[in-house]
Image: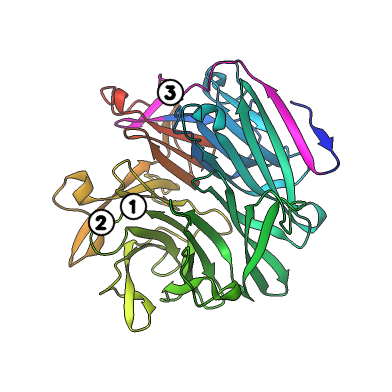
Amino acid sequence: MFRRFLFSGIVVVLTLLLAANPAIADPPTPDTAVEEGWYLHPLGKPNAADVPYPVSMAVNPNDGATWISYFEDMEDTLWVAHYVGTGGNCGSDYKYQCDEVGWQTGDGVYNSIAIYPGDGFFATDMTKVGVAYYSDVSGGSLYYGEYNCSGGLCSWATYLLLLGGYSGLEPSLTFDESGTPWIVFKRFVSGVTNQLWLAHFVGTGGNCGWGNWQCDTLVTGNYTANQPSIHVSDNGDLRLLYYNDGNANLEHMWYLTGDPGDCGPSNEWHCVSIDTDGDVGYHASQFYEPQTGIGDGRYVAYYSYQNGGTIRLAKFVSLGGNCGSVGEDDQWYCMDLTTEVGLPTGGEYGLVLTHDTHYHPVVLYYDTDGGPSGNGSLMIARRIADLGIPTGNCGMDDGSYQWQCETFDDGMRVGPPIVYQSVGRYADMEYFGWGDARAVYYNASLQQISIMMLDLDKVFLPAIVR
């Protein structure tokens, strides 16, 4: 375990002395193939009794290395794992390094990790790995940690942004094109009142993070600002999602550079309720593809508590939709992707919307009893047009099923004996490069994190190896 150094009570630095060679991509030899092209790697600290909680993942596109942030229950603080090849302390054959980033008990109960890959010839040295996290200390506080490398030396530094006031609940972190970190999060005020906050790094002249950050309140209301999500487009536009439990709707806020709005501070934001069908909008996940035809490729996936638990999907269509009313126009199209997936409680959602390298939407979701023995399983949904198949089995649109929902990990493991494990909570997923991908999720039966890897150069290997 690395020692931490405190400077003026503000910054905690973990100095990790690494070899001068750059980070190594994930291992070429699969441990277990679960589906053609996909290979399963367990990740857990040497003490198998340790219990990781909410999981967040990011992939460094410069080298394909996977970074995972998680709350470690036994240590009761935030940890980050990343691939090192050899000499690590966790994962299959100790190929991963798991480091304690939180420095206080209760750090990282909620966390979100993101990577800025840098640009230019020396992109590797400019790469930044950031993690936003909530700490239970001092009445609930928001922290930000950043991992920087230069000349082969890498270090973690953690910064206090907001002290107390239940600040930093359910954070969502991203970087803009210049490498500036942005964090959207919930703050509990009192009683049933919550607030939606937005923080970003400004360097000087800010109002939080010792003047280096700007923190602003966007929304105040009863039961609002739950499970927020953030996206920053290439031109600096901001798009936020959150669930409002006060009206049971999925809410959307966006800031367009140079375009006056109608809500938020100084009416600089635009606001719309995307889905008002009731009990909709839990754990929303979003992505944006390059502009194609009508609409601009905005997709949102989210949970509904209707019909025994439903995964719903919304797409921005500008005109002719059935939800997301702006004036007299329904600008979004909302649909059930699949029903009867169960009703996950607390933070045990397993839903992420991402895109493959062709910007085709991919939905990964948790089915509470979808496994062969009624165990929890992880499912994947893709459009039949993207798969090149004539018919689907879910996502009815235009009177026919336009999506294919299938098992990603059914939780069955061969020992002997055959066992059925509950897998799929806290899922996250990302594609990169020419089509490779990584997915992470929680295995409740083994109390450890699983990493699923797609390496296109290995699809000739056996489809199922357990």
Disc 3 crowd rating (10 Å Cα; few below 14, some 14-19, many 20+) is some
Q: Secondary structure at mark 3?
A: loop
Name which residue type carries label 2.
Answer: Thr
Q: Secondary structure at mark 2?
A: loop
Name which residue type carries label 1.
Answer: Glu
Give the residue at mark 3.
31
In x, y percent, where is residue 341? 40, 58
Q: Which mark is residue 397?
A: none
**Residue 89: quadrant of the picture:** top right
Q: Nearer the viewer, mark 3 or mark 1?
A: 1
Which comes sooner in the sequence, label 3 or label 1?
3
- Asked whether residue 53 is drawn in magenta, I would say no
Q: Which mark is residue 289?
A: 1
Q: Distance of mark 2 from mark 3, alpha carbons?
A: 39 Å
In x, y percent, where is residue 260? 49, 73
Residue 224 vs residue 145, the one in the foreground: 145
The range drawn in magenta is 10-39
Kindly tell me whether residue 212 is visible in this rendering.
yes
Give the residue at mark 2.
292
Look at the picture and state if 448 lies above or below 301: above
